[in-house]
Amino acid sequence: MEASGLQPRQSNRLPGRPNDPANLADILERVLDKGIVIAGDIQINLLEIELLTIKLRLLIASVDRAREMGINWWESDSSLQSVEDGNGGNARAQLEKENRELRERLDRLERLVGEGSKK
Amino acid sequence: MSDELARWAAERAPALLARAEEEALIVLRDALVAAALGERKREATPPSPPPSGPAPEPEAGELVWAYCVMSEGEPRPAERRGIDPGSAVQAVEAGGLVALVSRVPRAEFGEAPLRQNLNDLDWLERVARAHEAVLDAALEQSTIVPLRLCTLYESEEGVRQMLEHEAAALREAIDLLRGRQEWSVKVIVDPDRLSAEAHARSEQAQAFEHELEGVGGGGAYMLRRRLERHLREASESLARELAHDVHGRLEERALDAVTRAPQNRELSGHEGEMILNAAYLVDAERVNELRDLVAQLEAQHETLGARIELSGPWPPYNFVPSGAATIA
């Protein structure tokens, strides 16, 4: 049965689920964050795409809620480890320091982007 | 010695940075989500008014948007419209490869307007869905390598050059993905049923309740608080076990697996608590086994009020080999 045009994605969703045909989070977390990255001719500042991706990750994920439930193992991808499991307090202090540095870096990047778009 | 140190640092840096990034993102998340969704709602209320007055000198002409790449011999999808409804999806060939592309207006996709449009969630949704729709259509008959959103060229010639330049990496990706499919699995639990089940399974909870019967006043309050905390912890541990069990069993059957953070309910529209958001790469011929396994896992965890949503096949975004990704 060859249908012309787009066939709905098969799924085992029960009728009445709100996310039909595919939810926006499913699509955005793929089309922006994944897929092969090849530089095109249009020099959308790569930095901006990266920042947008970061923003979208934030928008898509409900990280802290899952974390409240003690689930954070996607952070180490499929190795199923919790940050606290191995290294205890040192790891946390280290993370906090890195956090600070990263936030400063993000600030700098965002300023750069801001200046870039004014040109 | 310093060589070794440099190697060690180079190895360790990405993981540390990734972790730190994740942590920093959480701090920023709430504000950004609130801002983005708030903005979206505000904009949704009045039906977006047509731009009044002359637009400030829009860029004229067109650009070429690339969707995905496949091998030369593969069937092309039936004729269809692209992201811009005025332009059809076409094939550009070079180096034994084919890219699906369509023309888009420079006034909307040129550097400056694109920068603005990317930050408009409604625009982004429309473009992302249109991009996805072309990939879905191509995926029905062919092995494709999905390109990230906004891979844009000045002309078809630029696409040809890209195909030639990236041919080795693209072929490697096609070979890896041929005959395989990406499927998404999400586990969503009903918090009330999870808690009820945790209660039913816990002797300690029942002991607390028994004790409560004979106590009043402040003592009862303290006991109730302890019972609540105990139930919360028991539910969390049930959820964790469930996510690990489902992911572990599916991963065993898959060629590759990727886990992602659970999704924001405002965007995904799910009810309940998402505790697993994963993608699996499986042989196309073994998809039925995956389906059976998912049904079996759902039945097995039925008492926890767990739904397991299986959807696919998706364009294999999550399994494009990372070595093939290049930033020129």
Image (cartoon, coloured by chain):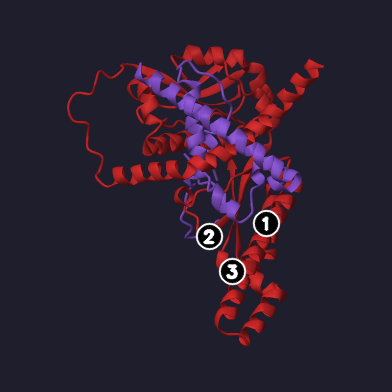
Chain colours: A purple, B red
Q: Classify B7 as above or below B265.
A: above
User: Image height check: is B236 above or below A3?
Assistant: below
Q: Nearer the viewer, mark 1 or mark 3?
A: 1
Image coordinates of residue A44 in percent, x first then y, are 45, 21
Residue at position x 41%, y 31% in the image: B118
Which residue bears the numbered disc 3? Answer: B193
The chain letter under disc 1 is B
Q: Which mark is residue B137?
A: none
Instruction: Choose the circle earlier in sequence order: 1 or 2.
Output: 1
Mark-to-mark CA distance, 2 and 3: 10 Å
Q: Residues within 10 Å of mark 1 (few under 14, many from 20)?
A: some
Q: Is residue B294 left or right of residue A49?
A: right
In this figure, what is the number of numbered marks?
3
Give left or right: position of B35 versus A56: left
- Amino acid under label 1? Arg
Dot 1 corresponds to which residue?
A: B240
For the residues bearing labels 1 and 3, Cβ distance under 8 angstroms: no
